[in-house]
Amino acid sequence: MIHYNELHHVSLTVTNLERAKHFYSSILCLKELQRPNFDFPGAWYEVNGQQLHLIVLPTSQTIRQDKRLSSREGHFALRVQDYSETLNWLKSKDVELLERPNGMSGFAQIFCADPDGNLIELNVDQKDL
């Protein structure tokens, strides 16, 4: 049996580090962390005790060719404090969104994508709307 403590990090591949860093820092408001001096470019971000790692790999097989938003494609989810505030912030930054405030999951969800098409879900419990 395996006993887990927490999710430590999620790694995503990106093609353009500066463009990705702008999105994760300025749009999603994540705090960049000091990253070891690997022999490949990337960036690390802190997400309330866990981490998001960006790795530059333009030939990655995980970068989606079809950039349309879909809640059924592979994605990671971030729990936010306020659905409306998050929704308004993203709209003010002209981020393309897929809104699911009343889904069957029990979460009020907002889906968006980074510049490389990596899908991100931002959610709250529906009871917290």
Image (cartoon, rainbow, N blue to C red):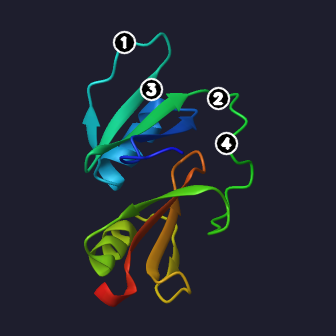
Give the residue number, with chain letter if any, for mark 4: 63
Marks 1 and 3, how far apart at CA = 10 Å
Hey, which quadrant is residue 13 in on the image? top right
- Would you call the spot at circle 1 few (<14 residues within 10 Å), some (14-19), or many (20 or more)? few
- Disc marking residue 42: 3
- Would you call the spot at circle 4 few (<14 residues within 10 Å), some (14-19), or many (20 or more)? some
Marks 2 and 1, how far apart at CA = 19 Å
Q: Residue at x 70, y 28 (%)?
A: 59
Q: Residue at x 26, y 46 (%)?
A: 49
- Disc marking residue 37: 1
In terms of secondary structure, where does tag 4 sit?
loop
Looking at the image, residue 82 sits to the left or right of residue 70; the answer is left
Marks 1 and 4, how far apart at CA = 24 Å
Q: Amino acid at mark 2?
A: Pro
Q: Amino acid at mark 3?
A: Gly
Looking at the image, residue 112 sits to the left or right of residue 37; the answer is right
Q: Are marks 1 and 4 in contact (CB under 8 Å)?
A: no
In terms of secondary structure, where does tag 3 sit?
strand
Looking at the image, residue 73 sits to the left or right of residue 23; the answer is right
Which tag, 1 or 4, sits closer to the chain's start? 1
Q: Looking at the picture, how far across and down is residue 74, in whole percent?
A: 64, 56
- Disc marking residue 58: 2
In terms of secondary structure, where does tag 1 sit?
loop
Regarding residue 106, the answer to whether it shows in the image is: yes
Q: Are marks 2 and 1 in contact (CB under 8 Å)?
A: no
In terms of secondary structure, where does tag 2 sit?
loop
